[in-house]
Protein backbone atom coordinates (compact mmCIF):
# COMPACT_ATOMS: atom_id res chain seq x y z
CA UNK A 1 0.00 0.00 0.00
CA UNK A 2 2.78 2.38 0.84
CA UNK A 3 4.32 1.69 -2.56
CA UNK A 4 1.08 2.87 -4.16
CA UNK A 5 1.56 6.26 -2.53
CA UNK A 6 5.32 6.42 -3.11
CA UNK A 7 5.16 5.44 -6.78
CA UNK A 8 1.98 7.47 -7.41
CA UNK A 9 0.78 4.60 -9.57
CA UNK A 10 -1.35 1.47 -9.51
CA UNK A 11 0.60 -0.04 -12.40
CA UNK A 12 2.13 -3.29 -11.16
CA UNK A 13 5.28 -2.80 -13.25
CA UNK A 14 5.86 0.58 -11.61
CA UNK A 15 5.10 -0.80 -8.14
CA UNK A 16 7.58 -3.63 -8.73
CA UNK A 17 10.34 -1.04 -9.17
CA UNK A 18 9.68 0.30 -5.66
CA UNK A 19 9.72 -3.02 -3.83
CA UNK A 20 12.64 -3.63 -1.54
CA UNK A 21 14.89 -6.63 -1.46
CA UNK A 22 17.33 -8.20 -3.85
CA UNK A 23 14.83 -9.66 -6.32
CA UNK A 24 14.79 -8.38 -9.88
CA UNK A 25 11.99 -6.05 -10.98
CA UNK A 26 10.57 -8.74 -13.29
CA UNK A 27 10.36 -11.17 -10.36
CA UNK A 28 8.62 -8.59 -8.19
CA UNK A 29 6.18 -7.85 -11.02
CA UNK A 30 5.39 -11.56 -11.33
CA UNK A 31 4.84 -11.84 -7.57
CA UNK A 32 2.45 -8.89 -7.61
CA UNK A 33 0.49 -10.37 -10.54
CA UNK A 34 0.15 -13.71 -8.72
CA UNK A 35 -0.86 -11.98 -5.48
CA UNK A 36 -3.66 -9.96 -7.09
CA UNK A 37 -4.88 -12.73 -9.40
CA UNK A 38 -8.47 -13.69 -8.52
CA UNK A 39 -8.57 -11.33 -5.53
CA UNK A 40 -11.77 -9.44 -4.84
CA UNK A 41 -10.59 -6.17 -3.35
CA UNK A 42 -13.00 -3.79 -1.67
CA UNK A 43 -11.95 -0.46 -3.13
CA UNK A 44 -13.91 1.47 -0.50
CA UNK A 45 -11.92 -0.15 2.30
CA UNK A 46 -8.63 0.43 0.50
CA UNK A 47 -9.53 4.09 -0.05
CA UNK A 48 -10.33 4.49 3.66
CA UNK A 49 -7.00 2.94 4.67
CA UNK A 50 -5.03 5.21 2.35
CA UNK A 51 -7.01 8.27 3.44
CA UNK A 52 -6.32 7.45 7.10
CA UNK A 53 -2.59 7.30 6.37
CA UNK A 54 -2.64 10.66 4.60
CA UNK A 55 -4.90 12.48 7.08
CA UNK A 56 -3.21 14.63 9.73
CA UNK A 57 -3.15 13.00 13.15
CA UNK A 58 -3.20 14.67 16.56
CA UNK A 59 -0.33 13.21 18.58
Image (cartoon, rainbow, N blue to C red):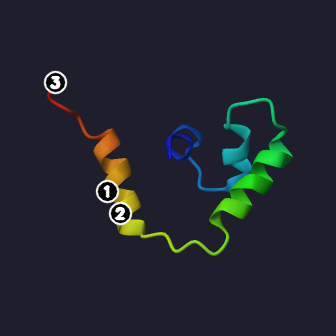
Residue located beneath label 1 in the image: 48
Q: Could you tell me how far apart the alpha carbons at marks 1 and 2 are, in whole angstroms? A: 5 Å
Q: In this view, does 34 lie to the left or right of 23?
A: left
Which element carries disc 3, helix, strand or loop? loop
Task: Give the total of numbered labels.
Answer: 3
Q: Could you tell me how far apart the alpha carbons at marks 3 and 2 are, in whole angstroms? A: 24 Å
Q: Are marks 3 and 2 in contact (CB under 8 Å)?
A: no
Q: Do the residues labelled 1 and 2 touch (CB within 8 Å)?
A: yes
Name the residue: 31% across, 56% down.
Answer: 48
> Are there few (<14), some (14-19), or many (20+) residues within 10 Å of tag 1?
few
What is the quadrant of the C terminus in the image? top left
Which element carries disc 2, helix, strand or loop? helix
The image quadrant of residue 55 is top left
The disc label shown at residue 45, or none: 2
Residue located beneath label 3 in the image: 59
Which element carries disc 1, helix, strand or loop? helix
Amino acid sequence: MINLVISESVNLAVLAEHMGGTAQIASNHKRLKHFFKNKNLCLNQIARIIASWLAPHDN
